[in-house]
Amino acid sequence: MPRRIAPFLLTAAVAVAFPAVASAQPGASDTATSLKVLSAKANKAGSRVSVKVRWHRGMYSGAGSRKRFVLRVLAHASNGHKTNLGSLRRRSARAGSETLVVRTTSASARKLRKAPRVTVTATQQYDSPSDADKRYEKNAVGIRAVSGKSRGLSIKACSIGAITPGADLSGCDLYGADLANANLANVNLSGADLEQGSLAGANLATTNLGGTNLVSADLSGAIWPAGEQSAMTFPNDGPDIVSLIGTAKTSVDVVIYDFGGPNVVGQPSRPGALMKAVQNGVNVRVILNSGQECTATDPPSQSLCAGQTGLDPLYATQAALAWASQNPNPGKTAGKYRVQFSSQNFQITHQKSVLVDTSNADGSPRTAGQMTPNSKILVSTGNLQAFPVDWGQFETCAKGGYSPSGDWVCQQYKVLNANYLSNPAATCKGGNPSGCAPEWAARDFAITVTSPGLLERISGVYAADQSCQNWNDAPVYRELLGSTLPDTWANGTLLADGSTYPTMGSTAFYGGSPNPELQAPPQGNSRQRQLALIASAKESLIVYNEEMADPDIANALVAAAGRGVDVRVVMASKVTKGVPSQNSYFDYLTGNGVKVNLLDRNAPPGVYYIHAKAIVADETNGFMGSENFGYSSMNYNRELGLMLTNQTGAGSAWLPSVEGIAAIMTAFEADWSNPQAIVYKPQKTPQTPPMPPLTPDKAYSGANMLCLQPEPGNLYAPALPNRTSPTPSS
């Protein structure tokens, strides 16, 4: 749970001692010779911190050379979050006590001088060379204040001794502790504070990490329990998507909103991950959002619609996979491929998932019992498309305007890349050797799912969507309404009588005027689950989203703030001369106790575009997925998210992902405290709670590009409408 810590007066000469933190059951000799930070003092400039430390004698004097001694200096903000100001790492130390100096950079020295509290954390590790696992069996931690008065400190001083397997450190303050490669078998760290610490390479297979604060902790290479789901934070972990696709042995299936780029797709001169998969004999399918406001439903007219500029990356993707199938790697038979538009059952297919080895050779979904150890699904908040100029784009609009009917139309096109089918990267500028920015440049998250039951569910939905099935044809759709698994779906809208989705070729949901044949009640579980998560918060709530346009969500956030929850929201906004655009939802939130920080949506240097959709309540339970806070997103679209937890025994509706919760919180704190973040203040008189609900009881008509059903027994048949190279308009 978040710690509310009173501010402290910075006084360089003050040194307040805290006991070392370690095992709950030490021996008497351990107590007498334990690790202890005897004193810590910073000079006035904050550039040097002198630390007198007595190392744990029993751990120090043992035979062998596998020893590690680490000091870290941490600045504590008034809200309890920490910043690492400097470190000192050694492989040897003096017996007894010694004085060491940690030097800080000029930037860290300024933070040290301004911080309400500064502490030093010492970590000592030892392991016998005869231990085959090469992990530290004995670890000790000590904490001491460099500056700050002692009143108000909420340090939980645990018993003194060495941290060994089985120790009870629940609720202990271990912030900054470097427990890398530690053997923490059966150690209870529930509710402990390890912010800015390290568990890199540590054995956590049987460690209790429920509710542990791991903000900005290094978790790389840690050994997790078998049921733990790993996490990615973008843009930093973007290359891991390429690696994940590279692990495929039989199939890669993608369903996504925006797509196309040099790393994930590629081109003949520089094959990307999907092209390499086809060349290695892996079958590849891609379902791409079909909402292009095409009003034609007959095949000849659809072919004309296929010439729209917005579809260029899709056709470039198909051309790239076609080349790969014709150029397999030596000794390999090329894999099959299919690129198609998404089902018209949904206003927009906004789901963002990559499925690896979850399909049989014929393209049918595997059951849970057929999944292999290599089967996995990446569930993401982010698209995989190169920005800011679309990879493979043939032309772009240089000048546009509104027609007499009120429709926006392009009046002048600019040719960008006449060879987009063979050289799509020529469209892009800067970023990497191919000339394109990476496909994961925004702030986003992803979870790699391995649970067989969840794999079967998600791959079953993929198969139904790929075959353009309706409500009556796909029993898996009905399973989503009352799911007891962590999958969280928006599942489209039925006809007004509740019988089925619209038939193929009928008007769908994108744009246009209300369609009286459709109804609006949610057919998935996304809205209910996100509202329940927000309502569960008791102390803290952090929120990422790209949109804020749903009264139910806004009211839930205001209600949480009203009951004393610290509610913080980070989003992107159009910023003009340092002032964000006025937004009635932001006015409502900030006028009623919710804190909102905004980052420029144009993503200047040092800022990521906030595209993520994530919630964490009380640093324990969370949500991450493709769903934006919009009426259409949660009612009409195809969306997928996951309910996450870092608690054990939470039940089947929660996916255990300590790393996922930590990843969201770590990125959030960085974005929240970004120097370029703008604190939103109400620009107009806010709505008095509650905000009235939206009542659009009709969906909207229009037509998407047709979802062409695969041929019977051939789920890899060509699917995109025929198209010739588009001709630039004038």
Image (tube, grey):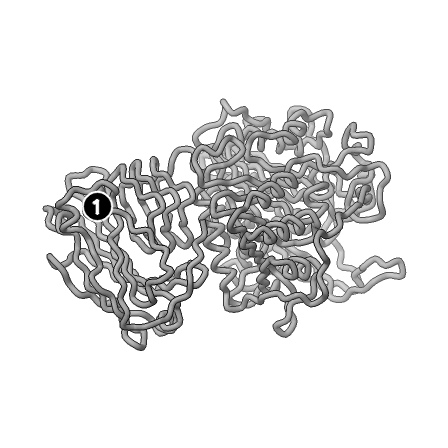
* Direction front: furthest residue: 151
At x 34% / y 35%, what residue is drawn? 206
| Number of numbered discs visible in the structure rendering | 1
Where is residue 129 drawn, in percent x and y?
Answer: 15, 43
At x 27% / y 40%, what residue is drawn? 167
Q: Residue 109 appears in which quarter of the rendering? A: bottom left
Question: What SS does tag 1 mark?
Answer: loop
Position above or below: 371 against 184: above
Where is residue 40 drawn, in percent x and y?
Answer: 24, 66
**Residue closer to the observer: 504 or 570:** 570
45 lies left or right of 269: left
Is residue 660 something that shows in the picture?
Answer: yes
At x 36% / y 70%, what residue is drawn? 112
470 lies left or right of 326: right
Q: Residues within 10 Å of mark 1 (few under 14, many from 20)?
A: many
Looking at the rendered structure, the kind of residue marked 1 is Ala
**Residue closer to the observer: 177 or 250:** 177
Residue pointed to by mark 1: 162
